Amino acid sequence: MDIYIFGQQLVNGLVLGSTYGLIAVGYTMVYGIIGMINFAHGEIYMISAYLTAIFLALLAGFGLHSVPVVLLLVLLCTLFLTALYGWSVERIAYRPLRHSNRLAPLISAIGISLILQNYIRISQGARNQGVPPVLEGVWRIPAQAVEQQFVQITYQQSLIVITALASMALLTWVIHHTALGRACRATQQDRVMANLLGVDTDRIISVVFVMGAAMAAVAGMLVTLNYGSFDFYIGFLMGIKAFTAAVLGGIGSLPGAMLGGVVLGLAESFFAGFVNSDYKDVFAFSLLILFLIFRPSGFLGVPEVEKV
Amino acid sequence: MWARWWMACRVGAIALLLLAPMVGAVLSGYQIETHWQRPLWLALAVTVGTFFCSWLLQHIGWFDRFGGRAASSTPAVTIGQSGPRPLWILLAMALAIALPFVVGKYGMSVAILALIYILLGLGLNIVVGLAGLLDLGFVAFYAVGAYTYALGYHYWQLSFWLALPLGALLAGLFGMVLGFPVLRLHGDYLAIVTLGFGEIIRLVLNNWVAVTGGPNGVSVVFPTLFGLEFNRRAKQGGTPIHEFFGISYSSDHRAIFLYFLLLAVVGLLIIMVIRLKRMPIGRAWEALRENEVACRSLGIHHVTVKLSAFGLGAMVGGIGGVFFAALQGFVNPSSFTFFESAYILAIVVLGGMGSTTGVIAAAMVLTVLPELLRDFSDYRVLSVGIAMVLMMVWRPRGLRQRRRPFFALPTAAEENRAAALVPGVDGR
């Protein structure tokens, strides 16, 4: 096996995996707190990709060209609006169904997913969109390499991994060391009891959706800057992949989401590199099915016990 | 009054924030075109709409009358006599039989498509509506059926009449194999696994070019009736049907044939579902949907019961696929996207999950309406999505109170006593 190809797939896998991990956070937190798969989460990611491109174009129109300032402003605007989309989705489609039967929120999520996709298709057009490269440049290891004998890391890729790690660290800190985080954990453990003890659980559930959407926004922006191209349908595939990552890591577990993301990213990347790139999605979905069958609690999850 | 305006304005402001970048700034290349009026008008519409909806809901009590939040606390199944009156059934049958002689060629193709969707809707209804299992990859079984016929004909000259049971069996087998391990898990996992499975099937059909022809698809031959062909000249070694009966050739014959065949299959399926609902297995499905833990403690084996519903639904999907292949004369993977699954799910949801009549009506509306409103085809999926969400928020159990047949208790006094003994049966 060529060590350089191996190294390159390792890098690609890590980059892919950290975006999966960021999106998986949204699935895992929502699942942990209300026990529901938020099928519209992939569309939230897709919306953040569009918002990134729109704000990039807007800022370029205003004549801003300093890369760090542009990236920071785009990140803030995208983060805020995507989080608002996440909040609205929860408010419109899930909150009224809080006490409904088990199937209703899932179906409503599918409905929201169709709505968001077609809202974007109608307002922005069905064609493929793109963003210009913002951050260009690569590192090569070793630096003085000859003819393909190197592992290449672009600045974009390192930005993805660093930002993903930083956001995960921030989120973990919020969950473990703030009053809000304590309320989130309390709601996750026992919603009724938390409510009795004065936690506004409806608000906490909203907050969880907002946090998930914010993480998806970070991922959406980074991936858009890296690949430069997207359309209104990207959320579907990314959604299933990220959910797979959440299941791999153990759904409901925050570090599990990141771990699952990285494992899935690496597995997919190596499969594409060494086996067959046509079937890499099939491989990822098969992994999901196999995990659900043989180890539904994932790497870090706890086995689920149904309460009466 | 002012409080309500204030609320509406806040909703409008949020809508403006959400809409402004998306609707107001359209990406074209790396530039954007701005349309500042559009988000403003839309946000204004949202504000006024919110105000009037909130006013209406409070003053007319419309919300309560249509169930509203109370819907979730009312029992899912009320006791009473079942189904539409025989007169209506006769009328519907007469209409269905008369239809091919009234509508033209185009009308027939819509009618056949509607029947296929009714078939698929009824199949998925067994899984989602009766057993309460969310299947998001129903299209996979549809694809298995369609490709059984297409590839079967391509490689082994399999006839339609053999492909029909074979496609159903194969789809059912796929359903069983997929469902068996997953159905032991928490219900939501089934949704995501079926979603993944649907994509796997589509990707394999798309990428395995050597066998399936990939995106180019496979062509399918039209079915024959006891060796009689529907072509002008015999191509498959049989006799053309118009020569056999001594009538002149018409391309309408094949549409009429397919229509009546489908009508018969749908009719059989309806009868089967009605019978199943009254049988222990059907009652076990509905009971499991309502409370799995209670059912298991009463000795119902949840995996087997769910698997029977899932497999049966998959079989119906397979039959639908064989018919779809015969209708199109050609199959390729682009007919089997996730959107197709979502559309069939929408039929079941809008039909009021579990109601046979509702599913039939929803399938007809969702196939005929887009044909009538071709100018608004961009908004078709959007409205389906909105309808799904509204349906779940307002009437998660369907527009009509579902009834099911029972053994009537002789007197009111006895009924009261029984209700007192079994709390919950009378709706509290």
Image: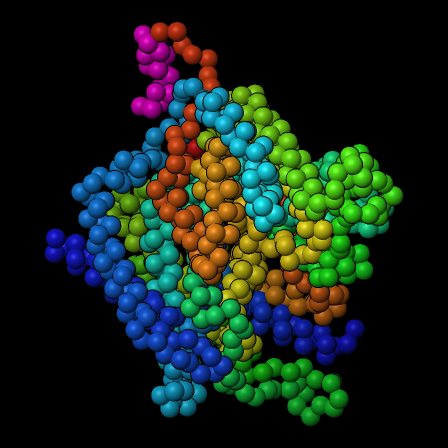
The residue closer to the viewer here, B277 or B52, is B52
Give the residue at x 68% y 63%: A280
Identified at 67% across, 35% down, the residue is: B261
**Is residue B420 in the magenta section?**
yes
In x, y percent, where is residue A224? 51, 75
Quarter of the figure with the N terminus of chain A: bottom right
**Above or below A127: residue A38:** above
Residue B277, located in which quarter of the rendered image? top right
Residue A76, image quadrant: bottom left
Query: In x, y percent, where is residue B418?
Result: 37, 12
Residue pictured at 31% horizontal, 23% vertical: B428
Give the residue drawn at x 35%, y 88%: A62
Q: What stretch is highlighted in magenta?
A: B412-428
Say whether residue B425 is left or right of residue B298: left
Q: Nearest the camera: A260 or B361?
A: B361
Establish if B366 lies above or below B8.
above
Residue B398 in percent (x, y) is at 41, 36
Does residue B113 show up?
no
Q: In this view, does A26 lie above or below A294?
A: below
Residue B419 seen in this snapshot: yes
